[in-house]
Each structure stands twice: as C-alpha cells, then as structure tokens.
C-alpha cells in the first residue's frame, strides 16, 4: 500500500514574498519558420567566423571538466581592453545575473521598525521609468524598497535639481541607469551621468547593454568613482545571447564583494571561449555596428516620412509612435504577417513600438508592410 500523503498545501511551503512574485516576461521566441524577429534586440548578424570556430573547437571531451571558476583569461583580456586590472572585473551568466547579484550585495531587504530616511535608503533600489523592465523584478525578488522615477516626456535625463523634485533618492543603496536607455533608445551625455554619480551616495550601475551602438560610453566614470559600476554584455552587440556572458567593471572592493556571493562556476565554459574569441576579432563587429547605425538612420527617415514620431536612437532599436493607427494595431497587424516587435502595455509608452534593427531585407519588409497597413487603414 502506498504511504499516505501528508496533508500539506505545497503553496504554503513557498515564502509569501515568492508566492506573490510576478516573474520577468521576456519577448516571445516562437519557433515559426520565416519569422522576422524585431522584438528582443538580438543582433541579426551571426558571430564572427573566428568565434564560431573557437566554440566548435572547444566542444570536445573537455566538456566533462569544470570551466575556469574566475574566468581569469577572459577577465585579463577585458582588463586590457578597458585599461584596468582583472580585479576590476567580474564576469557572469549574462549581465542579468550580475544585476541580480548586485541587489543581494548592496541592498538590505525591506524591514519593519526603524523607518528613518537613512534606513529606508539602505533598503532602496531605484531606477527610471521607462528603462529595463527587469529592475523592478529584481527588487521584488530581493524584497527591497523600490523608488521609480518617471522620465520626462522626451525621455531625457533630468538634471540633479529636477531629480530632487522628482523624488530621486540620492542616498539609495542601489541605482540602475540604462544608458543608452531602453526602450527609448536615447543616449545620455557622460557629463550628465557624471553629475548624477557625483551627487549619489549609494552604488550606481550604469547598464551599458547597448553602448556599442552609440558614439560614447561612460567607462571612465567606473574608473573615477568607487561607487560606480559599468555593466556590459556580449549578448546584443556581439551576437552571443545564446551563450550568456556579461560583466561588470568597478572598484576592486565592490567586485570582490560580488565575487563572494556568486556561484563558483557561474560563467559556462563555452561562453568564456566565445567571449575571448570575440575580443580577438573586434574589427568584424565594428563593421556591423556601422551597418546597423546606417540602417537605423534610413529606417528612421522612412518612418518619419510616414508621419511617425521616432526618438533619436543610439541603440540597435527604434522607439516609434505611429501616425493614423494605434501602436497596438500596428503591432498586431505586423504580427499577423510574422513580424514581431515589442509593445509595452505601460503608462506613457503604450503609444509606441520598440523595433529592433534587423537585416536590410527584414527592415524593407517591415517598412513595406507598415505602408500597406497604413493604406488599408486610411
Ligand atoms: C538585454 C539587456 C540586458 C541583459 O543582457 P544579458 O547579458 O543577456 O543578461 C541587460 N540590460 C539591458 C538594458 C538589456 O537590454
């Protein structure tokens, strides 16, 4: 006779905080043939042939061995690239993993009791809206307090005096700033970011996931300030989403603290191989970035000619408000024809679509379909 099942409600075994959580919702990845994916900011070009060869060469009987636990050769190569030391760098299973580690490393979970502004600040994660939609999820998972600060209508970075009026907390334990921002695509001037960092007391993570598509970057701030971390990823610009490799550059004391709480083998071996090979073939990618920037400009022009409002973008995507139809209609009609874009059902940005720059062919198809949708509508 089978043992009698204990009368336990499995849900009751789960922490209340976790029971209430809403997980991150990634852009859809359907496996449909002929699909044009302009919804997750993946690079339409493959990794360089050199990178593919390096991965293929590494996929042999050595797969049974653990990878380098500190990703030392990769960190050394990154240190040379950025003109710092390996001690300034931590590598992770995508930058998402490192962003999550940062919440556990720098922020106290919400506590009842002493609610002095100082205590509250220590428990606070803050970021702008709109920006990367993972930040609130990470804060919720950690049980931190959240301070969301709404960007102005043009999505520009407010000056410090205005930030104060918007209740930006200059004492917050951790602030995430996506730069260039997503989904707006807007770049912030390093001088303006420096002003923000200068006034900030807690850790600031400048999330530069799209920085390779821009003309400037804020790496020098991570070298200048002990509380500023730069977050980078091989996913978007280096066509390695599949491999999951990202990294932080920051003060050795912050990096060492993050290092203490990460899994020993957090960065998989083939990912390390792929990232290292990428760094030895950067020229291949420079050409791609140029092509994407050109296509970004021409697509913007075409959409503007249709009367659409397109924000100036320094990323590999556009954030566009259609003319004559709603963003949701545009999104749905494109989707009916196997073109995926991203529509966010959120206040302030419901009227726009985020469109990843794909290949020239994909963008032509996207534009011609958009024209058809408009003409049928009008
Ligand atoms: C895609 C993205 C990331 C995550 O990158 P991974 O390295 O693939 O985890 C982080 N931040 C922003 C703003 C992104 O768009």
Image: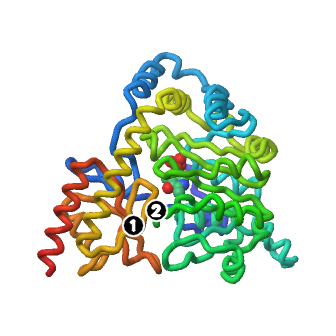
Q: Is residue 187 above or below residue 67?
A: below
Residue at the limit of the structure toward the left, as seen here: 376
Residue at 70%, 75% in the rendered image:
168
Question: Which residue corresponds to mark 1?
Answer: 319
Q: Alpha-carbon distance for marks 1 and 2?
A: 7 Å
Above or below residue 182? Residue 216 is: above
Please name the colour scheme applied to the rendered image: rainbow
**Residue at 45% across / 40% down in the picture?**
238
Q: Is residue 229 above or below residue 21?
A: above
In this view of the protein, which residue sits in the foreground, 177 or 308? 308
Label 2 neighbour load within 10 Å: few <14, some 14-19, many 20+ = many
Q: Nearer the viewer, residue 247 or 185?
A: 185
Residue 104 x, y percent position in the rendering: 72, 55
Q: Position of residue 172 (x, y in %)?
A: 76, 68
Q: Is mark 2 within 8 Å of ligand 1?
A: no
Pick the residue in front: 31 or 88. Answer: 88
Residue 338 at x, y = what percent?
A: 22, 58
Residue 216 position in % (x across, y down) = 55, 51
Give the SS element for disc 1.
strand
Q: Secondary structure at mark 2?
A: loop
| Quadrant showing the C terminus | bottom left
Label 1: few (<14), some or many (≥20) within 10 Å? Answer: many
**Residue 9 visible, this orientation:** no
- Residue at image location 80% in from the left, 64% down from the top: 201
Image marks 1 and 2: residues in contact by CB distance under 8 Å: yes
Residue that numbered label 2 is attached to? 185
Task: Confirm or reject: label 1 Cβ below 8 Å from ligand 1.
Answer: no
Rendered residue at 62%/38% (across/down): 266
Work out which residue is located at the far top of the displayed protein and give it.
61
Is any part of residue 279 visible from this angle? yes
N-terminal label among 1 and 2: 2
Would residue 297 be found to the left or right of residue 333 on screen? right
């Amino acid at each position: 006779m089978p043992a009698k099942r204990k009368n336990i409600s499995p849900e009751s075994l789960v922490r209340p905080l976790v029971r209430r959580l809403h997980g991150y919702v990634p852009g859809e990845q359907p496996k449909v043939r002929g699909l044009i994916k302009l919804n997750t900011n993946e690079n339409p070009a493959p990794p360089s042939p050199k990178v593919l060869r390096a991965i293929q060469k590494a996929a042999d009987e050595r797969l049974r061995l653990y990878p380098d636990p500190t990703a030392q050769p990769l960190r050394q190569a990154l240190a040379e690239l950025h003109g710092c030391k390996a001690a300034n760098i931590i590598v992770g299973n995508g930058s998402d993993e490192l962003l999550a580690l940062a919440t556990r490393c720098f922020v106290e979970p919400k506590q009842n009791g002493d609610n002095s502004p100082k205590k509250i600040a220590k428990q606070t994660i803050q970021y702008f809206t709109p920006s990367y939609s993972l930040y609130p999820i990470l804060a919720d998972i950690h049980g931190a307090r959240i301070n969301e600060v709404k960007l102005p209508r043009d999505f520009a970075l407010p000056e410090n005096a205005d930030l104060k009026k918007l209740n930006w907390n200059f004492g917050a334990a951790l602030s995430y700033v996506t730069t260039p921002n997503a989904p707006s695509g807007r770049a912030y001037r390093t001088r303006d970011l420096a002003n923000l960092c200068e006034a900030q007391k807690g850790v600031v993570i400048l999330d530069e996931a799209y920085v390779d598509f821009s003309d400037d970057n804020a790496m020098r701030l991570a070298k200048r300030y002990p509380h500023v971390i730069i977050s980078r990823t091989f996913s978007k610009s280096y066509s390695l989403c599949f491999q999951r490799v990202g990294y932080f550059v920051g003060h050795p004391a912050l990096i060492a603290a993050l290092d203490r709480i990460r899994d020993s083998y957090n960065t998989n071996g083939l990912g390390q191989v792929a990232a290292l090979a990428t760094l030895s073939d950067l020229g291949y990618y420079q050409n791609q970035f140029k092509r994407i920037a050109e296509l970004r400009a021409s697509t913007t022009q075409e959409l503007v000619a249709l009367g659409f409002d397109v924000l100036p973008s320094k990323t590999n995507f556009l954030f566009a408000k259609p003319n004559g139809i709603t963003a949701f209609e545009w999104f749905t009609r494109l989707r009916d024809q196997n073109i995926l874009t991203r529509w966010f059902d959120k206040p302030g940005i419901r009227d726009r679509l985020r469109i990843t720059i794909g290949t020239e062919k994909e963008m032509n198809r996207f534009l011609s379909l958009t024209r058809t949708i408009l003409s049928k509508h009008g």
